[in-house]
């Protein structure tokens, strides 16, 4: 099934020229999304550090309403989800789609205006949250005076992605394209339904909570997850230079994810004021998620097998493999959390926060970092200036996030156990969590160092782009191995 | 899978299924619940919030209290909610029919507040706690909301009875006293309005032994 992978070693000169043309066409727009995404990441990191610190030192910066925990935490979430994650995702989507369809990005100004609109909408929204205008609906806190701007921007992006697809020159469809198409079709549907029934004209009572978690779970499962998987499916075979292990597992993984993931949302409502059928159906669907997760994990693992040595040289591969492994772990943790007996303890605790970061950071963000390591040198025609900064970035984020999520998952479990025992006073439960909350702040600092290193490297790369041409160095870490990945489509 | 249209249809159909099952169906089943009138006592429950409490609810939203506090009691036998005194019965969908947005919450960094009005009706306690949670709950990680209060000079007639009573390290400089701003009053009215010890046909109160 070699033809089913971007891997293709018999590329002629004309193909290379075509790829270079496609990369060049993506330069401005993809850079715009990546750079603004990175600025949101830095802003989101500062907000995260503040929120984390406040959670064990509540008096810190407590004198102004806009700095209160409830607002800073919410601004953090929206900055990293709708700022960093969504914008980098769009950059990756555009580049992957153009490459896989073999068409240059057309009408860049349209895409650029979508990027500008998105950023304007988001700045208004985050300032709104700090000013107290949050909607109070989790994952949809951005006030309603900015969300139409975001929706318009995203509609432009989605339509344009589909247009690129429609005019594809490559008739063969690769797995990554399935996931991208799904993501750009699912997200506007989710977002518009949620905006209508929760913000514009709220449904009655508890129905809001139902819609809230249908959206909240799906924005991760049907928007970020498909983009992350599209990246893994593309870059993993690409960098190691061999096709994906099994086409059939890819198909199985895609369709079972499409079937089951979107029914998962109500496992966030276990024990809540709802009829039993609603909760049960989501628990069943959550357990069924084992199928796509395991299928994908096997597929990726057998693709990688025998090539783990390459992790040393390719930063892309390092981040992507870390992301792929985290996807498996976090998804299985998600399955477990959905089950009633586990939920009885872990629900409402910091375990959930840790789980969200397994998914959004250890899986998604790391995968996006890996993708950017591949894409940026190609669209700018320059190599990464500093191997040191790459290493620093990788080790800070990899170690940082493990030290974040693993202990906090455990701390959340202990918190849940303590809460279940009604004899333990609440303030004692708080005490149980304190060491884990403090450790989280420390890991936040480590992650922040990684983000700054990455951002510095990107800036350096760009300065070079505009400066005099420099001889490209091989895109490797240890400086030993020449690039082994064939330049496929 | 090289057939674009089929892919499109599959993608749309899968989401349509859960959109129907998890959005439309719950709306059908729970979207038109009405308050209940107890035929014996004539008590109607739930009731819309009175003005000041409704304003307080807006503050609760705007300050993000819902990220640390839930407002849902899990039924007897699932979790320790009732044993902890967070409510006398499990919450049901009807309890929320007037809520916009619904503050079910997803985190219990702090205790559940479904029934806080009954558990803690004292204005004085709430003012003191909101001004600085350490005053009543040493070691709490709830943030202080001192910005909902203002310092005023003690008047010629001596300390005002409306001032928040703060002792020891929390007391203001001599000659000054701490007064709740209208926002603090609204927030406390909201907290005091949170009561759910009224039985509903689908959620009776446990019989007293």
Image: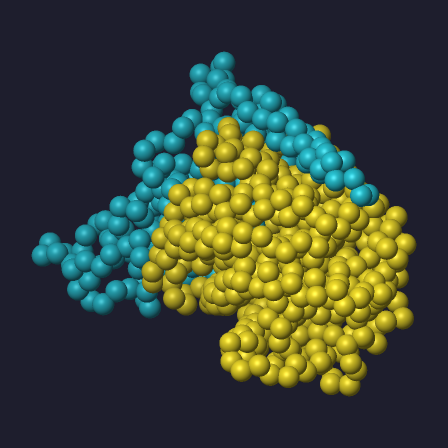
Chain colours: A yellow, B cyan
Q: Is residue B12 at all visible to an observer of this figure?
A: yes
Indicate the quadrant where residue A454 lies. Answer: bottom right
Q: Position of residue A278 (x, y in %)?
A: 68, 32
Please state if B195 lies on the left or on the right of A281 as rendered. Answer: left
Quarter of the image with the N terminus of chain A in it: bottom right
Question: Residue B193, relative to residue A253: is it above or below?
Answer: above
Q: Pick whichever, B195 or A314, lies toward us.
A: A314
Q: Is residue A215 at all visible to an observer of this figure?
A: no
Residue furthest to the top in view is B39
Residue furthest to the front in view is A14
Q: Position of residue B124 (x, y in %)?
A: 33, 49
Quarter of the image with the C terminus of chain A in it: bottom right
Question: Residue B78, relative to residue A425: is it above or below?
Answer: above
Question: Residue A435, relative to residue A208: is it above or below?
Answer: below
Q: Position of residue A24 (x, y in %)?
A: 61, 64
Q: Which residue is pictured at 75% across the width and 63% down the height?
A: A15
């Amino acid at each position: 099934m070699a033809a089913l992978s971007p891997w293709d070693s018999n590329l002629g000169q004309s193909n290379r020229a075509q790829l270079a043309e496609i990369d060049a066409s993506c330069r401005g727009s993809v850079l715009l999304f990546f750079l603004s995404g990175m600025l949101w990441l830095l802003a989101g990191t500062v907000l995260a550090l503040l929120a984390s610190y406040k959670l064990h030192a509540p008096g810190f910066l407590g004198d102004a309403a806009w700095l209160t925990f409830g607002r800073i935490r919410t601004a953090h979430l929206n900055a990293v989800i709708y700022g960093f994650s969504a914008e980098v995702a769009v950059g990756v989507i555009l580049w992957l789609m153009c490459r896989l369809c073999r068409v240059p990005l057309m009408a860049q100004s349209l895409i650029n205006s979508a990027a500008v609109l998105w950023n304007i909408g988001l700045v208004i929204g985050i300032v709104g949250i700090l000013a107290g205008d949050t909607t109070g609906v989790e994952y949809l806190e951005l006030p309603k005076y900015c969300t139409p701007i975001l929706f318009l921007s995203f509609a432009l992006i989605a339509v344009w992605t589909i247009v690129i697809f429609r005019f594809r020159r490559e008739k063969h469809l690769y797995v990554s394209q399935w996931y991208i198409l799904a993501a750009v079709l699912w997200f506007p549907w989710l977002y518009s339904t949620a905006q209508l029934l929760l913000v514009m004209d709220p449904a009655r009572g508890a129905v809001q909570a139902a819609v809230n978690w249908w959206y909240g779970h799906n924005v991760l499962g049907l928007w970020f997850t498909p983009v992350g998987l599209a990246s893994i499916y593309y870059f993993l075979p690409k960098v190691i230079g061999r096709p994906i292990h099994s086409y059939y597992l890819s198909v199985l993984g895609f369709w079972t994810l499409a079937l089951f993931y979107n029914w998962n949302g109500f496992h966030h409502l276990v024990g809540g004021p709802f009829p039993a059928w609603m909760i049960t159906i989501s628990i069943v669907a959550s357990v069924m998620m084992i199928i796509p997760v395991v299928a994908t994990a096997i597929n990726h693992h057998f693709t990688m097998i025998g090539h783990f040595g390459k992790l040393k040289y390719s930063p892309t591969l390092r981040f992507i493999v870390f992301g792929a492994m985290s996807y498996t772990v976090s998804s299985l943790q998600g399955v477990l959390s959905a089950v009633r007996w586990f939920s009885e303890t872990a629900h409402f605790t910091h375990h959930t926060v840790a789980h969200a970061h397994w998914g959004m950071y250890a899986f998604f963000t790391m995968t996006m970092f890996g993708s950017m390591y591949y894409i940026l040198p190609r669209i700018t025609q320059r190599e990464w200036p500093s191997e040191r900064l790459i290493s620093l970035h990788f080790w800070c984020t990899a170690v940082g996030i493990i030290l974040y999520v693993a202990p906090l998952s455990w701390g959340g479990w202990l918190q849940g156990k303590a809460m279940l025992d009604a004899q333990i006073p609440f303030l004692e439960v708080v005490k149980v969590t304190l060491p884990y909350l403090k450790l989280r702040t420390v890991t936040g600092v480590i992650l922040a160092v990684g983000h700054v290193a990455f951002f510095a490297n990107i800036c350096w790369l760009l300065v070079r782009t505009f400066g005099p041409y420099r001889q490209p160095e091989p895109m490797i870490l240890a400086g030993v191995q020449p690039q082994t990945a064939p330049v496929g489509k | 899978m090289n057939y674009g249209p089929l892919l499109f249809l599959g993608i749309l159909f899968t989401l349509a299924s859960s959109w129907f099952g998890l959005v439309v169906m719950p709306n059908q089943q729970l979207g038109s619940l009405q308050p209940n009138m107890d035929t014996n006592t004539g008590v109607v429950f739930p009731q819309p919030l009175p003005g000041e409490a409704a304003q307080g609810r807006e503050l609760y939203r705007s300050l993000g209290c819902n990220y640390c506090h839930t407002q849902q009691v899990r039924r007897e036998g699932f979790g320790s909610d009732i044993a902890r005194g967070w409510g006398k019965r499990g919450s049901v969908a009807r309890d929320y029919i007037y809520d916009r947005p619904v503050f079910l919450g997803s985190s219990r960094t702090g205790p559940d507040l479904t029934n806080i009005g009954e558990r803690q009706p004292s204005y004085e306690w709430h003012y003191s706690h909101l001004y600085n949670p350490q005053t009543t709950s040493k070691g709490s990680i709830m943030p202080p909301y001192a910005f909902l209060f203002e310092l005023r000079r003690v008047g010629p007639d001596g300390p005002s009875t409306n001032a928040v009573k703060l002792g020891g390290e929390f007391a203001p400089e001599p000659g000054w006293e701490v007064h709740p701003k209208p926002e603090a009053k609204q927030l406390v009215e909201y907290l005091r309005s949170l009561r759910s010890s009224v039985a509903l046909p689908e959620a009776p109160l446990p019989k007293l032994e």
